Image (tube, rainbow, N blue to C red):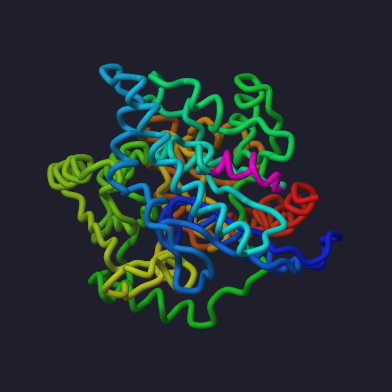
Amino acid sequence: MVGPLCMLGRMRIGVAATRLGDVDGVSFEVVKWNTVLTGLGHETVFAAGSLRQDQVGAVIPEMQLSHAAAARVSVAAFDAASDPQAVRQEVERLARPLQQALLCWVRESALDRLIVQNAWAIPMHLPLGVALTRVVEETGIPSVGHHHDYWWERERFAQPVVPEVLEHSFPPDLAHVRHASINSLAAGELRRRRGLESAVLPNVFDFDQPMPTDEEQRGRQLRAELGIAPNGVLVLQPTRVVPRKGIELAIELVARLELSQTVLLITSPAGDEGFEYLVQLEQQAERLGVDMRYAAERFRPNDAGGATDRLPEPTHSLIDGYLAADLITYPSLYEGFGNALVEAVYFRRPVVVNRYPVYESDIRPLGFRFVELDGAVTQSAVDEVRALLSNQELRAANGRHNFMLGHKHLGYHRLANELTQLLE
């Protein structure tokens, strides 16, 4: 856990985001940051379109990504057929009440610092980004922007019709705002495009927490529910179902392993970018004879709680998936960093990873022992996975090696040190 590293004294820190408590990477990182901040002696207060049941703060429905008017204008801003003046006017109309609500929250909460989680990076809610910038301009509150996905990293945001809005607020260039990128490539691009320096704060995990005492029982229970025999193989795909996750590579890998009773289990939801990709995966799995289970409704995030409107309560923590798994697949084509990859390292499970750009730049040089793909499933990768699954000692040795590297480079102590400097 985090030690007493902060020299600033106790502060009230506001955390603003579009939504919290979901199974997206931003929500996961907010929970980790909150654990570290409270461990350093600070108090946190939240503002978002939705909160976890254990998060104290303001629920402002207009902050949600799904807020209809904000979603419409945020799409129109990147449609070449849109009228730029109409887009500007609508962003302004929606930003004004958000600005007032956030000003009330900042003042009534008596905040000493503000942390904006990704709302200044990816322009999926333009009015919110503008409103937050104006709040900081008006109050002068020292702020940190934690940026997970910059707009220039996504093809659909490549041609804005209102580029001045992005220059103003995505992210803002203000003297009392400091920036944090989640990988070195993004930090370099922010510097090149905007002349802004940023700390590199990757996805981290609490490597000091003990493994669950009922580890074996929880793993066996989930395997039994899935109908997997003791000698069967459970391959876990612990990601959302969106095309950039490269899940078609996991299906092909499982097919080419040709192992008896192998289940590929996807644990996190589809729908963020529609359901067409899930349908394509189901068709591929059926064609190749892969037993693919999409069981997102069974799982909640690794930590307790969840969004206040999530019903019914899922029957398993994602931890159970890791405990039950024989192999983790992480064939992503693009990631900001890799939450599930870091979690797999903690649980000491063998991993198949695609060499996406941030993996190449920030993770691979650390020396982890993974089975690597380079955009395709090769016979050598298939053979390497077969060798791992048949050699328990090798799996255990690799797991210990990876855990030690994760503890050294991606533990909470790193985040605590970086946050202490950012908040000064």
As drawn, which residue projects farthest toward the right?
A: 7
Nearer-the-camera pick, 35 or 176: 176
The image shows residue 69, relative to residue 408, as above or below, that is: above
Nearer-the-camera pick, 421 or 292: 421
Q: Residue at x 42, y 46 (%)?
A: 330
Among the 4 quarters of the image, the one containing residue 411 = bottom right
Q: Is residue 324 visible?
A: no
Nearer-the-camera pick, 392 or 180: 180
Q: Quadrant of the N terminus?
A: bottom right
Q: Main secondary structure of the magenta part?
A: helix
Image coordinates of residue 226 in percent, x first then y, are 25, 70
Give left or right: position of 299 versus 282: right
Q: Is residue 401 visible?
A: yes
The image shows residue 156, relative to residue 306, as above or below, that is: above
Q: Residue at x 46, y 57 (%)?
A: 48
Image coordinates of residue 408 in percent, x first then y, are 72, 54
Q: Residue at x 74, y 63 (%)?
A: 11
Give left or right: position of 229 versus 279: right
Q: Which residues are magenta?
A: 132-141
Image coordinates of residue 173 in percent, x first then y, are 65, 30
The image shows residue 420, relative to residue 193, as above or below, that is: below
Tally of marks: 0
The image shows residue 69, relative to residue 59, as above or below, that is: above
Nearer-the-camera pick, 273 or 308: 308
In magenta stretch: residue 134: yes
Q: Residue at x 28, y 21 (%)?
A: 82
In magenta stretch: residue 261: no
Among the 4 quarters of the image, the one containing residue 76 = top left
Image coordinates of residue 14 in percent, x first then y, are 62, 58
